[in-house]
Image (spheres, rainbow, N blue to C red):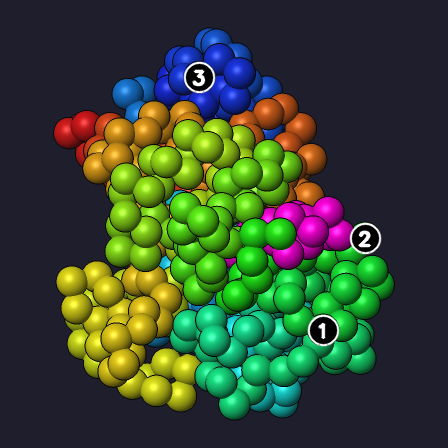
Amino acid sequence: MEKMKLVKNGLVLDSQKGFEVNDILIAGGKIAKIGKNIEVSETDYEVLNAEGFYVVPGFIDVHMHGAAGVDIIKADPGRLNELSLFLASKGVTSFLATVMTDSRENICRAVENIRLAVERGLDGAKIAGINLEGPFINPKYRGAHPPEYILEPDVKLIDELVEKSGNNIKLVTAAPELDKIEEIIRKFKEDIIFSAGHSGVDFAGAKEAFKNGFKHVTHLFNAMTGIHHREPGLAGATLDSDDVTVEIIPDLIHVHGAVIQMVVKCKTPDRVVLVTDSILAAGLGEGKLEFAESMITVKDGAAVFENGVLAGSTITMADGIGNMVKKLGFSLEDTIKMASTNPAKLINIFDRKGSLSEGKDADIVILDRSLNIHETIIQGITVYSTFPYPQSR
């Protein structure tokens, strides 16, 4: 049985005050108390001395297709468990298992496997639901999605997938300009967040879509109508809509760093959600491998099909956070908001995740001053640790 924990003297992130030296008492998988000089019996509690280290809420990746050789569309519950452990080592405590466009049979099998993994439980990062990216997208803006499996919107298919998933579908990416998509939104918008993406919709159409139920935008600027000074497109409509949240892939390949800075200025750190959009190549290094029924090459951090199209990213959330802070100059406070708080709010789990608050799940990450991950605690259980932490900070 896992001991109760006391994290001592860490630089604990308070969403209102920033970083303060505090202790965190963990009991029953929850944050029981945050304060100074908390004393416990060391026979009953595991005491972690986090002096000089950052203590932040666990990262939440709402858009990722795999990593460490695991492809979610093909993974059985055992492989999903392997993925969950890898993600935990990178600071991720919750994620949406993202299922991309594929055959109807493969999509159904994937959501069933994810349901089984949720029911059995995972040893690492927890699956907070399913992100269905496609198959209702615009073929002209398909990106890495196989064209032969792209479908017209089909209410019956969504019904089937919701059932097979055990009601675990939380987010759906679709092109707003497609016929019949409004029928799907009307039926499911109380239970599913709809995100505009892989779309050729124009500015006016995008603004109308936001009024009619689209609340989020998938990997802003990628696979959509971009900004032209006479044709603002979906990207322009997104930046002009205060109540719409946006995903950004912070690998500095999918979106230029200057554009990321522009997006955060327009949307503020409260409306930006960092995602990896990672594929099975993340964590594997350079080389060739198969993805989406084609060969891709990974070189200099980019995963690319033979036609030059990006196949998704190869970063982890820890990598993305490092890029935001070290290369783009964002504060760690704002970056954690974009990597934890905002995704928790997006998928409606902020009542228990996304910040370090008494009563919430003890999903906690401890980092050094260079932003290396040294401890990942999920619901009070240590899943990854280098304790005792190295003294060089």
Mark found first going from the N terminus, 3 or 1: 3
Residue at image position (37%, 20%) is 11
Residue 287 higher or lower than 248, as above or below = below
Residue at image position (40%, 88%) is 293
Q: Which stretch is magenta?
A: 205-219
Residue that mark 3 sits on: 18
Residue that mark 2 sits on: 190
Amino acid carrying mark 3 in the image: Gly
Amino acid carrying mark 2 in the image: Glu
As measured in the structure, the alpha-carbon distance from the residue carrying label 1 to the one carrying label 2 is 20 Å
Amino acid carrying mark 1 in the image: Asp
The outermost residue toward the top is: 37
Residue 234 higher or lower than 296, as above or below = above
Residue that mark 1 sits on: 179
Residue at image position (78%, 56%) is 189
Q: Is residue 207 magenta?
A: yes
